[in-house]
């Protein structure tokens, strides 16, 4: 079956046809590292991780680059206010970002290029653009000459007037055209800067991605992704400068953008201050539940985040892991696949449909009549979960993680359970019942099994 992806550039779903099926290339704009990532920032990381997994299942080699923006005015401001060099800030938050994404089950991308390691490539690309008549120097800046590229506006579908009115474009006397954007800007001595043919300065944001793409993936890539807010101006500008630097070659074949994660229907963003960081959410719920919640809406739709979204995700995963726990002793058959989950994902990453299919297999596993059918269905469930990046832990690990994040004092529960066992041994059933009620009052369900008393959080 072909892989169908919605292309922002053509505004329709298309069959994905990589230029070289032996080497598929994907680039996703990564974080600017000056603070904890919020759960909205995690949405593109998780969504494109699902696409990465799907591509890996289809093609022999996938090069997935997700950059780190480690030079930026917001980083400069953070460094200044804390009185430290920018590297102190960026090193710290890039580590936190990697750990947070790891906890959400995001595979490390093939490469994670940092902007500051690619200044020479950026300078070379800017020089090419100047030579080709697409950029000009003015007062220590180098600007991209927007009217020199007839295709400008094709990605965002904006006309010139909309762009200028809505773009928050900086007004500057040295711009030839209000839509022109910065490729290079001068740095004062207190700011990070690099020597360049236009004096000491630092790159504009957009050129970073184009230079890193050229270096690591080539002049034309198969897929370029990011959040919806990046379509304009960031990706429009990347497309313009990338195309012009390469003599008109296609810059990216497919452009994909995830919708916003909102809270109370408002975009989650650092500037609005309505954020929940991944870091704090991880202390409230297992990473896998956050991942499931992030994938519960189709990636192009908005996703309104609430405690309920996470609670529902946790309940669904509890059910799936409980089904797996029941068949822990059964060896899954080798090489199984569950086609409906893959088909759902191959239809423009339809994760809600894939998750409904997973719920269906869980039901089938619970009702499987023989060990042979259990071995088959268990294998299908695990294979389907792998594509989505879920259900890969041991059920016991999941239940421990779920207990830890539930806020219940596990030691206290264990103590009450032990006391109840002793009461029953002493045939003090009244006390045993009292202890059972005390345990239930903590929101905990106990199950007396042949291998001992097990507990879990009530749904
Ligand atoms: P930033 O660190 O702000 O550069 O953003 C990193 C990535 O997160 C970009 O791809 C953004 O488009 C994306 N992003 C930021 N806020 C949200 C949000 N509320 N919902 C979904 N994606 C977002
Ligand atoms: Zn970018």
Image (tube, rainbow, N blue to C red):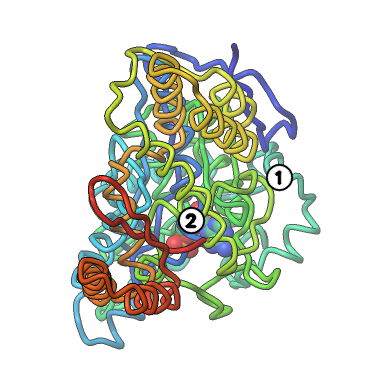
Q: Quickly name the residue at label 1.
A: 153
Residue found at x 28% / y 66% = 93
Count how many numbered circles sit on residues in the image. 2
Report the front residue among 334 and 181.
334
Q: Position of residue 387 (x, y in %)?
A: 44, 30
Mark 2 and ligand 1: say if the CB distance to the nearest ligand atom is below 8 Å.
Answer: no
Residue 301, labelled with which disc? none
Separation of residues labelled 1 and 2 (CA atoms): 42 Å
Hey, which quadrant is residue 95 in on the image?
A: bottom left
- Quadrant location, the N terminus: top right
In this rendering, is residue 290 above or below 362?
Answer: below
Pick whichever of labels 1 and 2 is earlier in the sequence: 1
Left or right: 91 with respect to 268?
Answer: left
Label 2 Cα crowd, 10 Å radius (few <14 / some 14-19 / many 20+): many
Q: Secondary structure at mark 1?
A: loop
Residue 232 shows in this picture = no
Hey, which quadrant is residue 335 in on the image?
A: top left
Q: Quickly name the residue at label 2.
A: 314
Report the front residue among 160 and 296.
296
Q: Nearer the viewer's eye, disc 1 or disc 2?
A: 2
In this rendering, is residue 431 above or below 400?
Answer: below
Q: Position of residue 254 (x, y in %)?
A: 58, 30
Hey, which quadrant is residue 415 in on the image?
A: bottom left
Residue furthest to the front in view is: 427
Residue found at x 32% / y 40% = 107
Residue 57 shows in this picture = yes
Left or right: 348 with respect to 160?
Answer: left
Residue found at x 25% / y 77% = 412
Residue found at x 54% / y 80% = 273
Report the front residue among 61 and 403.
403
């Amino acid at each position: 079956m072909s892989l169908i992806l919605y292309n922002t550039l053509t505004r329709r779903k298309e069959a994905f046809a990589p230029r070289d099926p032996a080497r598929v290339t994907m680039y996703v704009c990564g974080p600017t590292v000056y603070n904890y990532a919020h759960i909205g920032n995690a949405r593109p990381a998780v969504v494109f991780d699902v696409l990465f997994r799907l591509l890996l299942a289809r093609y022999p080699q996938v090069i997935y680059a997700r950059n780190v923006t480690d030079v930026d005015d917001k980083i400069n401001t953070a460094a200044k206010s804390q009185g430290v060099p920018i590297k102190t800030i960026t090193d710290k938050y890039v580590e936190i970002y990697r750990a947070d994404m790891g906890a959400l089950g995001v595979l490390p991308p093939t490469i994670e290029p940092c902007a500051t390691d690619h200044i020479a490539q950026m300078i070379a690309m800017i020089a090419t653009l100047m030579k080709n008549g697409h950029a000009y120097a003015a007062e220590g800046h180098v600007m991209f000459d927007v009217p020199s590229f007839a295709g400008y506006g094709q990605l965002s579908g904006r006309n010139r007037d909309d762009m200028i009115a809505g773009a928050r474009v900086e007004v500057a006397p040295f711009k030839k055209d209000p839509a022109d954007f910065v490729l290079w800007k001068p740095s004062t001595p207190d700011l990070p800067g690099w020597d360049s043919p236009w004096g000491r300065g630092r790159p504009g944001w957009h050129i970073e991605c184009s230079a890193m793409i050229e270096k690591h993936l080539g002049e034309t890539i198969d897929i370029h992704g990011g959040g919806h807010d990046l379509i304009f101006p960031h990706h429009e500008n990347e497309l313009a400068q990338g195309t012009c630097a390469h003599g008109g070659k296609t810059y990216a074949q497919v452009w994909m953008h995830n919708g916003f994660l909102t809270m109370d229907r408002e975009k989650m963003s650092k500037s609005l201050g309505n954020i929940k960081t991944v870091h704090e959410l991880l202390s409230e719920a297992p990473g896998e539940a956050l991942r499931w919640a992030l994938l519960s809406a189709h990636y192009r739709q908005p996703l309104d985040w609430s405690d309920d979204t996470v609670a529902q995700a946790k309940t669904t995963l509890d059910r799936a892991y409980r089904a797996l726990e029941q068949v822990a002793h059964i060896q899954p058959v080798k090489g199984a696949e569950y086609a409906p989950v893959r088909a759902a994902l191959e239809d423009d990453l339809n994760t809600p449909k894939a998750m409904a299919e997973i719920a269906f297999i869980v039901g089938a596993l619970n009702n499987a009549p023989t060990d042979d059918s259990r071995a088959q269905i268990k294998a299908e469930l695990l294979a389907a979960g792998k594509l989505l990046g879920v259900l890969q832990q041991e059920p016991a690990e999941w239940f421990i993680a779920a207990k830890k994040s539930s806020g219940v004092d596990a030691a206290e529960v264990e103590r009450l359970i032990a006391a109840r066992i002793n009461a029953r041994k002493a045939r003090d059933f009244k006390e045993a019942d009292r202890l059972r009620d005390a345990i239930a009052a903590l929101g905990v369900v106990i199950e007396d099994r042949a291998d001992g008393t097990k507990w879990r959080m009530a749904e």
